[in-house]
Image: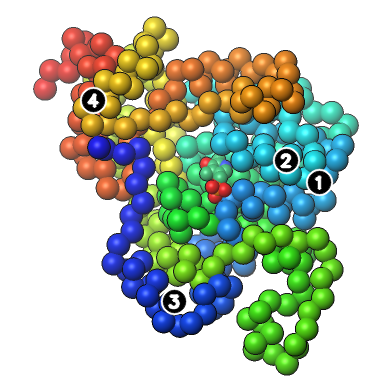
Amino acid sequence: MLMVSAPIVGIPEKAALFEVIDSGWLTMGDRVQAFEEAFANLHGAEDCVAVSSCTAALHLILDALGIGPGDEVLVPALTFVATANAVLYVNATPVFVDIESLDVPLMSIADAEARCTPRTKAVILVHFAGYLPDRDAWQQFAARHGLLLIEDAAHAPGLKEVGTYGAAAAFSFYGNKNMTTAEGGAVIARDRALRDRIRLARGHGMSSGTHQRLNSRTPTYDVTVLGFNYRLDELRAAIGIVQLRGLLGWNEIRHILVMQYRRLIAQHCPAVKVPFSDPRLSAYHIMPILLPEAAQRQDVIDRLRSQGIQTTIHYPPVHEMTLYRERFPGTHLPKTEAFSRRELTIPLHPEVTTKAVEGVVTALADAVGVSQMGMAK
Ligand SMILES: *Cc1c(COP(=O)(O)O)cnc(C)c1O
């Protein structure tokens, strides 16, 4: 089966894991620190905080920014549910914002503007599929309304621009992301005081960790804030250090594959649209396509599956999930809904070959019934 995504892990990761096990120190040690330095460095940041997931990262960011009950946070609905869940964790209210267009499925500034109230405190931007929203425009919007800008950067590790939009950015190293530690995440926050608060809250709000206490003469610790256990362990950090060496190269391969997909889809199944037709910075996390309005998506999925090609949907809109429908009834986002109904995500990861891309496009053209329009080769 050609998978939508696949982790690239092998001998170097295994060796790194063995080393950690032999070292006898399994969590929050030198490797976590080395990983934080390397990840920050790759993004041109001074420092970052490694955590157990992107979801934890988002929660820590909102918590450290003091967002809470009565506050509203603008979020896209075309995202993974964790983006909105994090807002509920701090007892604030997620306000769903529509996308710009079917071609630019990023949060619409015009719709965000319309949904601002005196209670709006922050915006969480999502770099959907790896494509970056317009930073200047969002910064102006945030400044105009006095809002905090937060990036859910789960789709876009490896770009220097990411983490520079506003207060902080949350990254994911889940198994299907551009780089992985199996589970894991990180926060880039440019402001040192904010970063310190996040680092403190990551480990129960304890003034010193086990490792620091080992290396110093302070046998005790204090707890100054209500923290969480959102730590990353040494095993995952060790995998992360290895993965970081591959990240930029893998992103480049993803880019090349996306260009090939775009060219072949335009040639062989022009009824299928590929979003982001204009050039835009991207980490090329996934390959979303829009099926023709008349196509039966489930049939296309089944046909591709029968040819050994996995596909997925990014995303079923968050505001249509039962939890959110019940809590926030009557939310309508026509463009998000139209996009989501027609979207299909086709395989994209660094081990997809150019031959496989041709195979996917051929199967796709067949499946949407446009093979007669010129799959002749
Ligand atoms: C994967 C993902 C998350 C959640 O990441 P975890 O590390 O699994 O918590 C959040 N937001 C988006 C947009 C994602 O794709």
Q: N-terminal of the two: label 2 or label 1?
A: 1
Q: Based on the displayed image, in which of its 4 quarters is residue 51 positioned?
A: bottom right
Question: Position of 117 compared to 88: left or right?
Answer: right
Q: N-terminal of the two: label 1 or label 3?
A: 3
- How far is the residue under mark 2 from the one under mark 1? 8 Å
- How far is the residue under mark 4 from the one under mark 2? 40 Å
Secondary structure category for the residue under label 3: helix
Secondary structure category for the residue under label 4: helix
Provide residue 102's location: percent of width, then percent of height: 51, 20
Q: Which residue is mark 2?
A: 87
Q: N-terminal of the two: label 3 or label 4?
A: 3
Name the quadrant of the C terminus. Answer: top left
**Identity of the amino acid at label 1?**
Ile
What residue is shown at x 82% (from left), y 71% (from top)?
223
**Identity of the amino acid at label 4?**
Ser
Q: Which residue is mark 4?
A: 306
- How far is the residue under mark 4 from the one under mark 1? 48 Å
* Residue 308 makes an appearance in the image: yes
Mark toward the viewer: 4 or 1: 4
Q: Which residue is mark 3?
A: 20
Is the residue under label 1 in contact with that under label 2 (CB below 8 Å)? yes
What residue is shown at x 59% (from left), y 39% (from top)?
126
**Identity of the amino acid at label 3?**
Val
* Residue 277 makes an appearance in the image: no
Q: Which residue is mark 1?
A: 67
Q: N-terminal of the two: label 2 or label 3?
A: 3
